[in-house]
Amino acid sequence: VAAAKGDYRHFMQKEIAEQPRALMDALRGRIDQERGRIELEDLRLSDDDLRRVRRIYATACGTAWHAALVAKFLIENLAGVRVEVDYASEFRYRGPILQSDGERDALLLAFTQSGETVDTLAAMEEARAQGAPSVAIVNAIGSQAARVADGGPLYLHAGPEIGVASTKAFTSMLVVAYLFALRLAQARGTLTPAQIREHIQALIELPGKAAQTIELATPICIELAERYHRAGNALFLGRQINYPIALEGALKLKEISYIHAEGYPAGEMKHGPIALIDENMPVICIAPRDHIYEKMISNVEQVRARHGQVIAIGHAGDTLLAEKANHMIGVPATLPLLQPVLNVIPLQIFAYHVAVLRGCDVDQPRNLAKSVTVE
Ligand code: G6P
């Protein structure tokens, strides 16, 4: 096992570093650059099937659930199909109404790295019982989720993920969800060919930008980890498509470092979390220059006014953000809908180094399992 880690101290560290390669593998063979089209060979739904879909239920557990939350933005924005997101463990017991009698317009989209998470499998079973096809965005080849997904498993091709805290599987899920959203848009005609080409170009540039992100963020994250690893609490704020990234940043930190961390939509901060902010509280604010940037800037100001320590994640070279925050981690810019893939990387690296400094068992955190196959 030690050999499999190569030069890395932990699998999590190795898997973070593998992300540029994993993203490339997720894209491989799925983009026809010449024709400007997305080709998902493993998808077992025809253009007609895709046109019939009027609502999608995205379901998952843990980190994969955060990918499902991001997918809602991707699918609604790119393909104009409504998406509801549920924890699989809630979905299976709430008596979900996927489609009314006679309608054949719902699709279940399951996200699961292992393909063996019991609640996610139960949600897929519920879809089957109601006659809705399911598509699984899944890493483990031949896993149960891959086998029961009658709409096809869309494989991540991320390679085995050993660290309990999911990293490369998460960013690969975002990329495969993006491809699926574009494939849906292609069938439904919601994007022009020129727009599809623009998304394809951004996808092609993404692995390189992920590599740049790792390079840019690592030294700063190490410094920040040294400074903040004794914190008792941390708050992660984001808005819109970066709100799930705030949730994921908080989950990563709490899973492996046992620091209590919360992810919150930044606009809700004033309805609760603001009460916790003091000079000991690191507040990680995700603030790329998108349509909600100004709002994030005022959230940063509000945190600073309460003496919170702001660590900002934003576009490299954003001097305004750097001025407003106590610390800034710059990441390359990409299309707003793809930005989450890059924004999450510093959060993974930060959590990793904090956990190492706290002497935690990074790859096998207490009480957690890589895959939860029993309830
Ligand atoms: C466990 C793991 C998480 C993972 C979740 C869902 O809780 O510790 O890292 O996100 O299960 O797993 P799945 O294999 O379905 O993605």
Image (tube, rainbow, N blue to C red):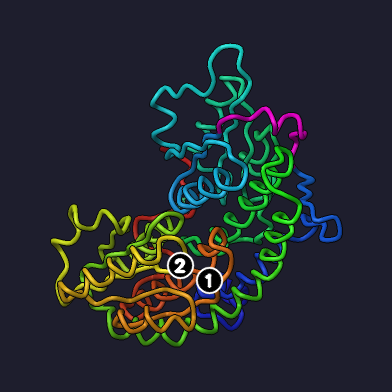
Q: Is residue 45 left or right of residue 178?
A: right
**Nearer-N-terminus badge (1/2):** 1
Which stretch did the figure color magenta? 43-55
Q: Amino acid at mark 2?
A: Asp
Secondary structure at numbered mark 1: helix
The x, y position of residue 222, in whole percent, is: 40, 85
Q: Is residue 78 left or right of residue 90?
A: right
**Nearer to me, 82 or 153:** 82
Q: Is residue 277 above or below residue 66?
A: below
Q: Nearer the viewer, residue 295 or 357?
A: 295
Mark 2 vs ligand 1: CB under 8 Å? no
Residues 32 and 297: in front is 297
Callout 1–callout 2 Cβ contact below 8 Å? yes
Label 2, secondary structure: give it.
loop
Name the mark on residue 11: 1
Q: In the picture, residue 211 is in which quadrant?
A: bottom right
Identify which residue is drawn at 36% across, 66% down.
294
Quarter occupied by residue 203: bottom right
Q: Position of residue 12 (x, y in %)?
A: 50, 70
- The numbered mark at residue 363 is 2
Quadrant of the rendering where the N terminus is positioned: bottom right
